[in-house]
Amino acid sequence: MKLYFAPGACSLAPHIALAEAGLSYDTTKVDLRKHVTADGTDYYTINAKGYVPFLVLDDGSTLSEVAVILQYIADRKPGTLAPAFGGQDRYKLMEWLNFVATELHKTYGPLWHPTTPEATKSANIERLRARYGVIEKTLATQPYLMGEAYSVADVYLYAITRWAAMLKVDLGAFPALAKFMARVEARPAVQKALAAEGLK
Ligand SMILES: N[C@@H](CCC(=O)N[C@@H](CS)C(=O)NCC(=O)O)C(=O)O
């Protein structure tokens, strides 16, 4: 498997999941400003969507979209990072993945762009804080989004929430979230992916 990633981007989530699952994988770094890979290849010729993450499987088939790639990786090691397909818990996992993707990940997006009007940025920050309120209530009574079991939803939440400090999203009102971030960051697989992306 080969993962196309950009340091610290949402592709950090599948990078961590690959390390957590103990799978064999390669990575290729993408410059998202120029949309070229480390060897100068036009990234649009690899992934027409132009964004990371992008996973190329050993048979040459491909997957994009964080929430889908995370589940694909988790399912390579059943019983570790995701509940089995078909059970109620799997739908709960997908509910969290969708929440992180659509309510957090996509709300952070405009904060990265210098051309986004300040009023839009402020509105998005308020929306993020409201959504983190839901996360905080959950993490106040259990260590992970799914309860006692660590899952790819936690990996996604961690990778996205790392952006808060850089983008001046004040999460000081969420102590359970802060403890969660420290708990996840202490994991050896997370440290391995952070080091590989030059983020330590
Ligand atoms: N819908 C995609 C969004 C991925 C995404 O937003 N990737 C960002 C980095 S976090 C990116 O590559 N942006 C550069 C671009 O869109 O050209 C997913 O869920 O995987």
Image (tube, grey):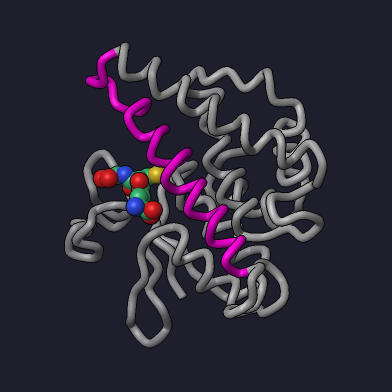
What residue range appears in magenta? 90-117
Measuring from the top left, give residue 111's x and y in whole percent: 37, 25
Percent across and percent down for residue 77 are 65, 78
Q: Is residue 192 above or below residue 60?
A: above
Which quadrant is the C terminus positioned in?
top right
Q: Is residue 109 magenta?
A: yes
Q: Is residue 90 left or right of residue 126?
A: right
Left or right: 170 in relation to 37: right
Which residue is found at the position 77% from the left and 54% from the top?
147
Quarter occupied by residue 92: bottom right
Q: Is residue 182 above or below residue 57?
A: above
Q: Is residue 153 above or below residue 130?
A: below
Q: Is residue 72 above or below residue 130?
A: below
What percent of the width, then of the height, locates residue 143? 80, 47
Of 131 and 150, nearer the camera is 131
Please identify the dominant SS of the magenta region: helix
Residue 52 in sight from this viewpoint: no
